[in-house]
Amino acid sequence: MHRILIDINSCTLKRGQNYLPGIGRSTLELIRAFGRITPIDPIELQLYAQYVRSKLNAREDYRHLKLWHIPLPGNQRLRDLVCYTGIREYLSRYDLLHVPHNYETVRFPERTIVTIHDTFCFKDTDNANGLMEQREKQTWLAHACKAIVTCSEASKTDIIHNLNVPPEKIVMIPWGINTDTFFPEAGQNADYKLSAMGVKGPYFLSVSCGVGRKNTPMILHAYRYLYQQTATCAKLVLVWKDAPVWLLEEFAPEFSAGRILLLPAVDDQMLRSLYSAAIATLYLSRYEGFGFVPLESMACGTPVIIGSNTALKEVAREYGTYVDITDKKDIAAAMAAIMNEKVVFNSKVLHNHAAGFNWDITAKAYLNFYMEHV
């Protein structure tokens, strides 16, 4: 029996947190898929997490997988300390350690595989000093580990270029989409949930918002231009917990008039309703290692307006509406075309495309990858 230990620290929810970001989400869905695959001999999957006041998300979905829980805070300093003491190795006796979150301090890199989602720390020139430690740790583990998995060909190319890793050390296994969660939703239940959040009437949607990499301010500029040109009744809904004050001030007229709505972080059920009822989802990110948002939107039958950069075109393929993410007029034109039905999308076709990214297939590919490197 080969023991595989998976570090699932990214799956912990802090107090008051009701959602996981991208890396935590992908790790959780992979573990959930492992939980559905039985038996998985000759592999024994074990999990490792370090937390005190946090909790693991959806533990019931993979409860039969052995969990080694270290009751210490999960900050990086104490995770490093646990590594140096060898507690993780003593408890689990693993043959292979899987780090699914870009980099980590490990005791035996020669018995470690790492999932590198992206190399954004090399792309973010605006925060170069703050990301230097990430660059050093990611580079060290990429060179020292046994093998690397990544989620797109775009990320594989970046790993080769930015980390100077030979291509034969890297395997591409795409992530999946949970179509039990994301599917076209209609009817009174969806309308009631949206009304409770203050969302009424036609709207465009943007989620996973932010300045810099996520490029959300350009969406607001494009929407303002669209309104100036067409006086559209469609609103813009942003799922954005901490929008910067300067942006709220710059677009105060739109916020005051109710044309732009800000929502806090929402759970997946609410997110499904938002996707399903939207005219289109806008996702103008400058850099993505995969592209969950476009696929989640399509799984709900809703078209996406995106850039053709990095992995986005790789996952959306011919089903995305591609724009110049630096040109508000081009973006507004795409919004108008979808709104006025000059471009028509088949919801079922969009859903079926997203459903092709399947977590069970991903999990089986990972199990084969483990066996090759154990």
Image (cartoon, helix red, strand yellow):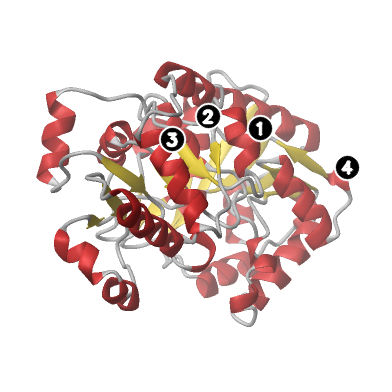
Q: Earlier in the sequence, mark 1 or mark 4?
A: 4
Tell me the SS state at disc 4.
Answer: helix
For badge 1, the amino acid type reads: Tyr
Which residue position is annotated with label 4? 168
Label 4, residues with CA under 10 Å away: few <14, some 14-19, many ≥20: few
Residue 89 % position (x, y) = 64, 54
Identify the residue at horizontal 56%, vertical 46% (top origin): 323
Residue that lies at the very extreme toward the front in this rendered image: 229
Foreground residue, 52 or 182? 182
Q: Can residue 134 be spotted in the picture?
A: yes
Which residue is depicted at the point 36% across and 55% down? 223
Measure the C-alpha gap from mark 1 to mark 2: 9 Å
Amino acid type of the residue that numbered disc 4 sits on in the rendered structure: Glu
The mark nearer the N terminus, 2 or 3, is 2
The answer to whether mark 1 and mark 2 are in CB contact below 8 A is: yes
Q: Looking at the rendering, which quadrant does residue 225 occupy?
A: bottom left
**In this figure, which residue is indicated by the disc labeled 1?**
366
Residue 331 position within the rendered picture, expressed as x and y whole percent measured from the top left: 48, 50
Foreground disc of the pair 1, 4: 4
* Front position among marks 4 and 3: 3
* In this view, the mark in front (2 or 3): 3
- Considering depth in this image, is 304 or 234 the residue closer to the camera? 234
Q: Quadrant of the N terminus?
A: top right
Q: Which residue is mark 3?
A: 296
Which of labels 2 and 4 is toward the front? 4
**Disc 2 to disc 4, C-alpha distance:** 26 Å
In the rendered view, does 65 fall on the left or right side of 371?
left
Determine the secondary structure under disc 2.
Answer: helix
Q: Earlier in the sequence, mark 1 or mark 3?
A: 3
